[in-house]
Image (tube, helix red, strand yellow):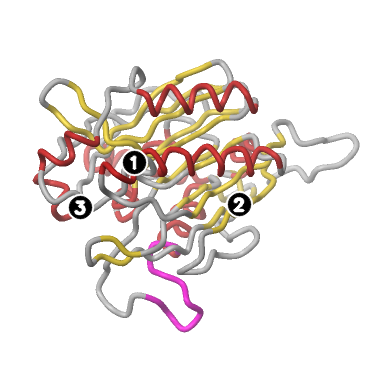
């Protein structure tokens, strides 16, 4: 069972986290303002005590590229490009960790990438493995699920459509992720888009992945409309029990959600009691290959 915080059992890695819900717009004429907006959002969240700040998918460029050539015009190398350089500077200035979506170019390949940057500089990247709809015509899918060691805990990354595939969150937690940062541009799903509470399906998938793996998820989505497409908002931050902390964000408003987490609480939260232990209860004799995880010993 998770040990409650007390004077004799304080939080081991108490961190205020922030999920930024914003409205970046595609078009080279908008890129400079998109990046400037992310810097304002980072500063605002840091000013309210956030140490881990998550921005949406493709936060610097907007989403709806008409052509592969247009996407290339927006893309940058990682981490050498100007946008990462700005985020690296902001992370050092505010002493924060930043996760943000960016269009990455590497030679003739394009990736829908999430970068992790800390006070010490660039830490690593995750290239989206599950490409949605027309993304398949523009981006190359990634092929790895990295988990990054940081001073505040072990951080895993996913991007948008990944949350529909339970293997992603499972592989990240099987590798010891203390928190998953989810950068998103949630769009159309089979209707209704929202339930009676005003929440979209992706919010519930995030809650389910968090609950099933006893790991908090910081999910930052975007809002607004772009070239005829509507984005769904509903950003959220879950605890190790899967329930949202501070509710689910509005579907329309630009906002920032905050939560205080003990990031390493997930290391014991997987044990629910003497007879319920999520890692031990997994039937890895039956589904290792289906999961795509090779059974390498984990740190958890």
- Could you tell me residue 95's position as x and y percent? 64, 25
Q: Which residue is mark 2?
A: 239
User: Which is the main secondary structure of the residues drawn in magenta?
Assistant: loop
* N-terminal-most mark, 3 or 2: 3
Secondary structure under the numbered disc 3 in the rendered image: loop
* CA separation in Å, label 3 and label 2: 27 Å
Q: Residue furthest right?
A: 7
- Residue 126 picture quarter: top left
Q: For the residues carrying marks 2 and 1, which lies nearer the camera in this image?
A: 1
Judged left or right of residue 67, residue 74 is right
Provide the residue span drawn in magenta. Answer: 194-203
**Vertical placement of residue 14 versus 80, above or below:** below
- Residue 141 picture quarter: top left
Q: Which residue is mark 1?
A: 31
Residue 188 numbered mark, or none: none
| Residue at 32% across, 22% down | 78
Secondary structure under the numbered disc 1 in the rendered image: helix
Q: Are marks 2 and 1 in contact (CB under 8 Å)?
A: no
Q: Which residue is mark 3?
A: 132
Badge 2: how crowded within 10 Å, few (<14), some, or many (20+)?
many
Judged left or right of residue 96, residue 186 is left
């Amino acid at each position: 069972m998770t040990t409650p915080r007390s004077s004799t059992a304080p939080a081991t890695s108490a961190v205020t986290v922030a999920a930024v819900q914003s409205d970046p717009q595609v078009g080279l004429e908008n890129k400079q303002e998109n990046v400037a907006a992310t810097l304002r959002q980072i500063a605002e969240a840091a000013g309210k005590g956030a140490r881990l700040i998550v921005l949406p998918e493709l936060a610097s460029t907007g989403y709806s590229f008409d052509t592969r050539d247009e996407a290339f015009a927006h893309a940058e190398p990682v981490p050498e490009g100007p946008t990462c350089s700005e985020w690296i500077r902001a992370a050092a200035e505010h002493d924060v960790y930043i996760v943000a979506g960016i269009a990455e170019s590497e030679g003739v390949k394009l990736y829908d990438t999430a970068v992790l940057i800390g006070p010490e500089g660039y830490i690593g990247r995750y290239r989206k493995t599950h490409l949605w709809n027309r993304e398949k015509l523009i981006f190359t899918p990634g092929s790895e699920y990295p988990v990054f060691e940081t001073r505040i805990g072990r951080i895993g990354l996913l991007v948008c459509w990944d949350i529909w595939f339970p293997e992603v969150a499972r592989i990240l937690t099987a590798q010891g992720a203390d928190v998953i940062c989810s950068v998103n541009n949630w769009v159309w799903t089979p209707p209704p888009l929202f339930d009676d509470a005003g929440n979209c399906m992706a919010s519930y998938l995030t809650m389910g992945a968090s609950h099933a793996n006893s790991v908090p998820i910081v999910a930052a989505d975007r809002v607004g409309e772009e070239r005829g497409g509507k984005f769904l908002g509903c950003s959220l931050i879950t605890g190790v029990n899967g329930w949202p902390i501070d509710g689910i964000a509005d579907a329309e408003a630009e906002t920032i959600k905050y939560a205080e987490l003990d990031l390493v609480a997930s290391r014991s939260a997987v044990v629910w009691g003497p007879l319920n232990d999520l890692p031990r209860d997994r039937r890895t004799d039956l589904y290792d290959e289906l999961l795509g995880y090779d059974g390498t010993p984990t740190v958890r």
